[in-house]
Amino acid sequence: MKRTSTLLAGLIAVALIATPVFAETASVNVKNKIEDRNKKTEASTTIKVEQKKTEDKNKQSEWNTRVLDNKIRGDIKVFTATANRLDKIVVRIQSRVTKIKAAGGNTTQIEASLNIGKTKLAEARADISTISSIDITGATSSTTVRTLFNTIKTNAVKAREALKASHSALIQAVTFMQGVEKKVKVKDSNVGENETSSSTASTTKEDNS
């Protein structure tokens, strides 16, 4: 009996000594698990924040691109409308040139200016066509958007200058025509300063935009 008691006492003593060791190990394991979980949570939060930033940046970029595209489409409409008005003036001047020739008038200067106007108008239409063919909304990066926009900007400047040159040449043609018509009798003269005034106002407005 005494022997059994001694054995039990020994086992209890061993258990009492081992318990703190097991408890400490368990505490370390829990602590490590908590730290690992916190790290994962922090990493996940960081990833989500970065994803949100990227999404916001992409949305802003898309919005800016749409605004820019709308501005470009608006400019194309203005350029095209101006070119159409100049086309009508070209047709009327050509009609008057035919009648002036039939009346025996000299149309050399008129036709020279008219040809310059037609050439510049053709150049403007080519530049407008180039601008119209570019779609920046399909660009996959901001770098591509900038590259396309620079191309558009270059052609827009060329189109504007060509329209101005065409307009000036046609006005000069009308001036020459009015001078010739004072010397020869031509019926139904309907191309004069009033015919080009609307085009002049439009081109001036466009140049200031």
Image: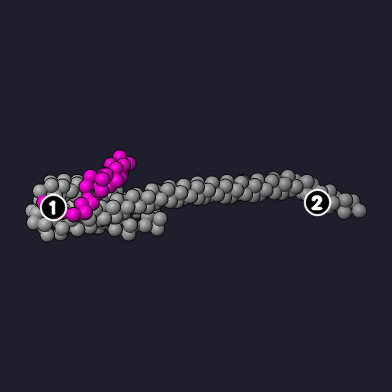
Query: What separation in Å lies between label 1 and label 2 (alpha carbons)?
Result: 137 Å
Q: What range is drawn magenta here?
A: 184-209
Q: Who is closer to the viewer here, 24 or 181?
A: 181
Residue 123 percent location from the top left of the image: 21, 55
Q: Please, what is the dominant secondary structure of the magenta stretch?
A: helix
Identify the element where label 1 is drawn: loop
**Residue at left 13%, top 47%?**
182
**Residue at left 18%, top 48%?**
174
The colour style of the image is: one colour
Residue 20 percent location from the top left of the image: 73, 45
Which quarter of the figure is the C terminus placed in? top left
> Does residue 10 show up magenta in the picture?
no
Q: Who is closer to the viewer here, 154 or 182?
A: 182
Toward the top, the furthest residue is 208
Q: Amino acid at mark 1?
A: Lys
Query: Along the polypeptide, which appears first: circle 1 or circle 2?
Result: 2
Residue 177 shown left or right of residue 65 in the figure: left
Query: Which circle marks residue 112 in the picture?
Result: none
Residue marked by disc 2: 11
Q: Who is closer to the viewer here, 133 or 23?
A: 133
Identify the element where label 2 is drawn: helix
**Residue at left 23%, top 51%?**
190
